[in-house]
Image (cartoon, grey):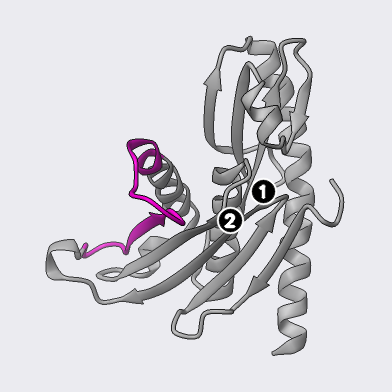
Amino acid sequence: MNEEFLKCRLGFIGNSDGSAYVSQCKTTVAVSVVGPFEPKSSKCLYDRGTVDVTFRRKTGSITVHDKMLEGIMQSTCEEALIVEQYPRTSIAVTVQEMQDRGNLLATCLNASCLALMDSGISMHHLFAAISCAITDSEEIILNPDELQINSSVAYFTLVFSSSESRQLLTSHTTGKFSHSIYLQCMDKCFAATREVFSFYENMIKKQLIYC
């Protein structure tokens, strides 16, 4: 994974509590976080905060597939945030696609984590996502491009927490694959997320230096 794999700019949206503009390979997304704020009474929970993730395409309307991706992002963010610390409030995460050249879900998840970090909202753990494609010869390709994804027999996006133990938070898979291949993908993706977490750490250090 080279240094061009991930690029990020934090705090670029002035009217948000946290934001991140992230390029992962050739896919780019922008994420803003607002909150915690007081929601409508119908969305208010007395013992915890609520998380609302909205995904927006660059062009066109949202599809059923996009709503599924939105749900994956929401459940991942909810699990990472300490929502019990913010009762009767809501946290809004808006994910805007800028350019999709493959691995969109992983890019959106990593950008969401960086934006939440920038917001200062308390979290149980950070999270990092890595995608991989499986060829018909069972070769595992990390961070595949569009051509590799389209020609693959299976495609995974795996999300791990920042804990030292291999805690798998989210698994989104398509295609056919064996159990042994899935375990191999978990090993490779988990190792790759360590580099993503190192990138997060370096971004926060830079942010503190410039504050």
Q: Element at badge 2?
A: loop
Residue 58 lies in the magenta-colored region: yes
Percent coordinates x, y for residue 75 in the rendering: 41, 46
Residue 192's place in the image compared with 150, above or below, is below
Q: Mark 2 and mark 1 in contact? Answer it, CB < 8 Å.
A: yes
Q: Residue furthest front?
A: 59
Name the amino acid, label 2.
Answer: His
Q: Is residue 132 something that shows in the picture? A: no
Percent coordinates x, y for residue 47 in the rendering: 26, 62
Residue 83 is left or right of residue 89, and the answer is right
* Quadrant placement of the C terminus: bottom right
Q: Residue at x 58, y 69 (%)?
A: 20
* Quadrant placement of the N terminus: top right
Q: Residue furthest left?
A: 42
Q: Which residue is mark 1?
A: 163
Residue segment shown in magenta: 45-68
Percent coordinates x, y for residue 187 in the rendering: 75, 29
| Label of residue 125 in the image | 2
Q: Element at badge 1?
A: loop
Residue 110 is left or right of residue 38, and the answer is right
Q: Residue at x 54, y 32 (%)?
A: 171
Q: Is residue 115 something that shows in the picture? A: yes
Residue 58 is left or right of residue 187, and the answer is left
